[in-house]
Image: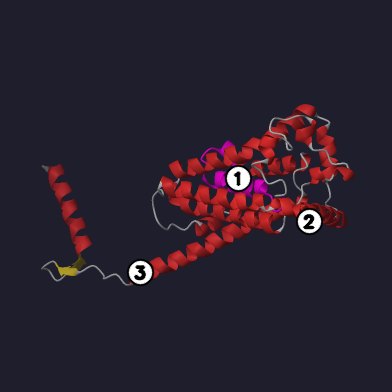
Amino acid sequence: MTAALRRVFARGKQGRPRLWTELALIVVGYVLYSLTRDAVPGQQATAMRRAESVLRSEHRLHIDIELSVNHALDKITPLIVGMNYYYATLHFVITIGVLVWLYVRHPQIYRPARTVLFLATLSSLIGFYFFALAPPRFLTDHGFISTVVTHHTWGSWGSSNVDSISNQYAAMPSDHIAWSGWCGIMLYRYAGRRWLRVAGLLYPLFTFTVIIATANHFVLDAVGGAIALSAAFAIQLLLSRLGSRGRGAESTSLPTPRAQHDGGGHQGTVGEQRGVSDAESAIEQRDG
């Protein structure tokens, strides 16, 4: 993983980007999300049919674990309520926290890391727009329990404040998996403390359990989220390679350092002579 990330995050433009650039990306993301949300009313019937189709496909593949997990964990009220809040909050809190951490502590890889996250999110938005899909919690005829509604969790689906700002049919691919996978990789690779690296590895696994238990996603949604993240890394790898080739071509076009004679027949570059001069000055100061 280390070698792969080194290639993906090959150093390009150094230093932290301007904050206004990052804020502009957030605005662009919100506008695109709003477009997908506004397109939902005309796709509800299609989204429900697709959910039925996904469930049948998972049954044929023997990976339809959602209903069993949903019912088993719903019986443990403190656990499922905690998962409801996990689903609603950590998705944003941890992702923003990791972004800020990279911006402050690892500015040399912040740009490509942020680009991977943006590309993964963009591919998710494309999926939401062209493949509106109802989550399992809407398939009540199959016995699924909408845990946030059943346990009256704050911000439950169906309340006006949530419906007005969220896309209820944005299940495929799962942004929760794409974002938690991104956070996990960043923490595992760049965190100095071992417990943070372990937490990074476990975070996507916990998130997968939560999205299934709360009936917010199918297993195939999680697969879609993993594919979206992988595609984003692949695109960033391509961008890094193209950037490296551009810098390599630029460096070969630069003139070589001018050689100078030292009077004794030895040739050295200007940089070498400057280094020798600095060393001699340091010796003189020490001996003096």
Question: Is 176 inside the magenta-drawn segment?
Answer: yes
Circle 3 SS class: helix
Quadrant of the frame with the C terminus: top left
Name the front one of labels 2 and 3. Answer: 2
Image quarter where the N terminus lies is bottom right
Assign a secondary structure to mark 2.
helix
Residue denoted by label 2: 46
Image: 191 above or below 4: above
Name the disc covering residue 230, or none. Answer: none
- Residue sticking out furthest to the front: 42
Q: Which residue is mark 1?
A: 184
- Amino acid carrying mark 2 in the image: Thr
Density class for disc 1 (Cα within 10 Å; few <14, some 14-19, many ≥20) is: many
Q: Nearer the viewer, residue 213 or 127?
A: 127
Q: Which residues are magenta?
A: 171-198
Q: Secondary structure at mark 1?
A: helix
Give the mark nearer the N terminus: 1 vs 3.
1
What residue does disc 3 label? 250
Residue 228, image x, y percentages? 64, 56
The answer to whether residue 227 is visible is no
Foreground residue among 190 and 208: 208
Give how far across and how far down residue 131 sits, in percent: 72, 57
